[in-house]
Image (cartoon, rainbow, N blue to C red):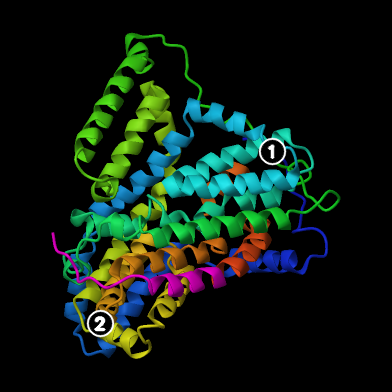
Amino acid sequence: MNVARRTDTGPSGGAPLARAGAAVADLCERYFPDALVFALAAVLLVLAAGLALGETPVKLVGEFGRGFWGLVPFTMQMALVIIGGFVVASSPPLARLIRRLARVPKTARGAVAFVAFFAMLASLLSWGLSLVFTGLLVREIAARLKGIDYRAVCAAAYLGLGSVWALGLSSSAALLQATPSAIPKELLPVTGVIPLSQTIFLWQSAVMAIVLIAVSVSVAYASCPGEGRARTAEEMGVRFQDPSIEIPKPRTPADRLENSPILGTIIGLLMLSFLVLEFRGTSLAASLNLNNFNFAFLALGLLLHRRVNSFLQAVARAVPATGGVLIQFPFYAGIFGIISNTAIQPLMADLFVKITTRGTFPLVVALYSAILGLFIPSGGGKWVIEAPYIMAAANAWQAHLGWTVQIYNAAEALPNLINPFWMLPLMGILHVRARDLAGFSILQLAFHTPVVFLLCWLLGMTLPYSPPVLP
């Protein structure tokens, strides 16, 4: 990696929003600790809450320990979402597609809007795919299109994670609720199994995604600095090396086997054949779950890379990005164990009922989920913490359970626009800092928040209640 020394001190020009964004990002870099710190602090918080409610220390510690390993399957599934998205996005065919796409935009503003659109479109398939795909797209565009503001186009590449990813096929909460084996046994009676037809495939969810994409692309286009105010990659001292995977010339029989396209192609086709059988006679919404989602991406990865050594190199590059998920989710599971098996759950469920009405329930859930997302930047892990009392309150108010999941999904993405945790993979690809993206991300947040809250409330009134359905 060849990255020249960065001499910029923040967004240039006199835009108050850009200066405010840089100030917020600086505060985050100085005072915002790693997400694991918040997970550990949350353990202490729920322990203290349990003690205050009269639970014994022995019971609290026991529930924490027994719950600690309860999300192991889900943790592995989330890690594979990241790996599968990275493997597909970094494959040679998609690299060629990215080079072709990079030739489409002819102006700086058009390029920023173009990247924003593809970031969100890709995130509806997989948020892992979105980060890598659009990151590589930005690199190609920045090399081809002179005069483009590098901060604006990099912020556009992150919009998938800050807007609609959780409304798409890789939604952690929706996929968990559609996968009986992934739902903790204490949560199952509260929520039941909720098929994707009742979450991400609702027409209301599609309307929300379309509106957010339109808003995001429009804001990205309008906020792109014009010539004279733009900060290019060259001005920011950013230089790139070729990200393509290098395959050495085979020298041994083992090398030739690893370099052969036959094995990967056969296994990839075998995996896709299984999915055809799995989906035969049923709808996509009924059959798609975390296991089938990851299975499909791994199969595509094998087929797109073809050669085993290329596939393995892509996996090796993706693994470091899974570290936060692997170490944090067990602590979220421990928190869930305490909440769901002590007096905390009925207290929180009762509190949500007391402070809301049937009409205001969607707004309170959205606000609570967005605020908590600042401190627990994990869609799946945070859902496991919130679900016991939010879904219990949804049952009490007879709110549509699937739409409650979607309210959580839409609101949970909002803090991603200012929380640097999920920016890390993209920052590594593009050689930027969180502060470089903050001004444009905060601007998107200002537009997204009222739109999300309005749609969560308005569209929720169109859906009837159905009680939990057990497998």
In percent of width and height, residue 305 lies at 41, 25
Q: Secondary structure at mark 2?
A: helix
> Is residue 462 in the magenta section?
yes
Q: In the shown orientation, is residue 14 left or right of residue 74?
A: right
Q: Depth check: 224 or 329 in front?
A: 224
- Name the residue: 39% across, 72% down: 460
In percent of width and height, residue 429 lies at 57, 42
Q: Which residue is mark 1?
A: 105
- Name the residue: 22% across, 56% down: 182
Mark closest to the chain's N terminus, 2 or 1: 1
Determine crowd level at label 2: few under 14, some 14-19, many 20+ residues with C-alpha closer than 10 A: some
- Name the residue: 40% across, 48% down: 322
Residues rendered magenta in the picture: 450-471
> Is residue 350 in the magenta section?
no
Residue type at the position of mark 2: Ala
Residue 416, placed above or below residue 428: below
Residue 396 - label: 2
Residue 246, placed above or below residue 68: above
Q: In the shown orientation, is residue 94 left or right of residue 403?
A: right
Q: Is residue 81 visible?
A: yes
Locate the N terminus by quadrant: top right
In percent of width and height, residue 194 lies at 25, 61
In percent of width and height, residue 151 lies at 69, 51
Residue 288 - label: none
